[in-house]
């Protein structure tokens, strides 16, 4: 399954009927940046702004939780996005937020979706066209349908420590995974879920922000001890870069990959749950 398109592909298809381009930038660790303002200043022609900052479940006690089905339905209707379109998502984020949007779209039933490899940074570096004209699309009639197989919760992760029904791959950096570095949230313990495997998400990418090729990705997961013939659930700090792991695994042909959306923010904050430092 190819979850990526190149900048050349997108340049060749700009303006094509049935194409929807989505700016999914969000700057989690760069508070001085404003993704909405950056979109308004310069974006790929035809792109709409997803606004991931507001596309979360505000009623959840866990930060950055996936939106409800109703929220996602409303947002897609507002943006004029529907099942019959080819959807290309990009970002300008160090944590690859386009992959979070890619996962979200698939979770809610939009299958014809891909990420722009290298994002808008590569697009700009190649001198391709930009605009400050805000795209206005005709509101649609999209209705979300949730694919529950793509999600795991805290109870699933706890049970899996004993049952080992799937592999749990954590995309945080090695120092946070091992517990050497404290979690940025003071109420969250350090360490990782017992039995989980560490594949830092940035190891998936080349220096120019493009995803490594399938040979390199396969070697990376194999080297970390991930059995690519078995199901995988990904996690990270708050469910964002875990989606980059899911996309990379999809590039290797895996369709049995789920997300633990609560990730370490939820797990590490619960004193009753087991944690390991190493």
Image (spheres, rainbow, N blue to C red):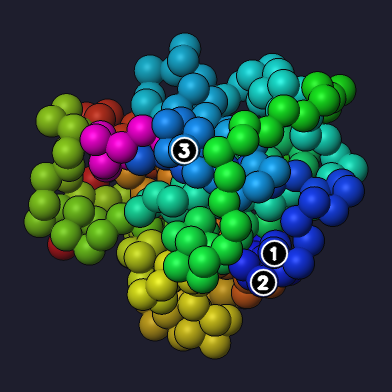
Side (left or right) of 103 relative to 30: right
Residue 243 at x, y = what percent? 51, 51
Q: CA distance from mark 3 to mark 1?
A: 20 Å
**Magenta segment includes 32:** yes
Highlighted range, magenta = 28-35
Q: Considering depth in this image, is 151 or 193 the residue closer to the camera?
A: 151
Q: CA distance from mark 1 to mark 2?
A: 5 Å
Dot label at residue 262: none
Residue 250 at x, y = what percent? 63, 65
Say whether residue 220 is visible. Answer: yes
Please name the residue that numbered disc 2 is placed on.
8
Residue drawn at (77%, 29%), measured in percent from left and top? 137
Please name the residue that numbered disc 3 is placed on.
41
Within-10-Å neighbours for mark 1: few <14, some 14–19, many 20+: some
Q: Say if 56 sits above or below 119 in the image.
A: above
Foreground: disc 3 or disc 1? 3
Say whether residue 86 is visible. Answer: no
């Amino acid at each position: 399954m190819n979850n990526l398109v190149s900048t050349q592909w997108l340049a060749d298809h700009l303006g094509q009927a049935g194409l929807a381009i989505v700016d999914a930038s969000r700057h989690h660790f760069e508070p001085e940046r404003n993704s909405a303002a950056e979109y308004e200043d310069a974006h790929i022609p035809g792109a709409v702004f997803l606004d991931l900052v507001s596309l979360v479940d505000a009623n959840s006690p866990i930060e950055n939780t996936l939106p409800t089905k109703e929220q996602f339905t409303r947002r897609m209707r507002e943006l004029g996005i529907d099942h019959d379109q080819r959807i290309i998502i990009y970002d300008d984020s160090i944590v690859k937020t386009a992959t979070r949007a890619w996962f979200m779209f698939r979770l809610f039933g939009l299958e014809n979706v891909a990420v722009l490899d290298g994002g808008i940074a590569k697009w700009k570096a190649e001198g391709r066209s930009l605009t400050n004209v805000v795209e206005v699309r005709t509101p649609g009639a999209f209705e979300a349908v949730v694919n529950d197989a793509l999600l795991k919760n805290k109870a699933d992760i706890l049970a899996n420590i004993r049952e080992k029904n799937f592999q749990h791959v954590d995309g945080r950096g090695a120092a946070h995974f091992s517990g050497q570095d404290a979690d940025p949230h003071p109420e969250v313990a350090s360490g990782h879920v017992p039995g989980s495997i560490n594949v830092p998400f940035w190891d998936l990418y080349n220096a120019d922000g493009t995803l490594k090729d399938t040979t390199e990705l396969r070697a990376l997961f194999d080297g970390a001890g991930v059995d690519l013939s078995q199901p995988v659930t990904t996690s990270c700090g708050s469910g964002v870069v875990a989606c980059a792991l899911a996309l990379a695994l999809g590039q290797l042909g895996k369709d049995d990959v789920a997300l633990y959306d609560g990730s370490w923010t939820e797990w590490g904050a619960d004193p009753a749950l087991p944690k390991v430092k190493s």
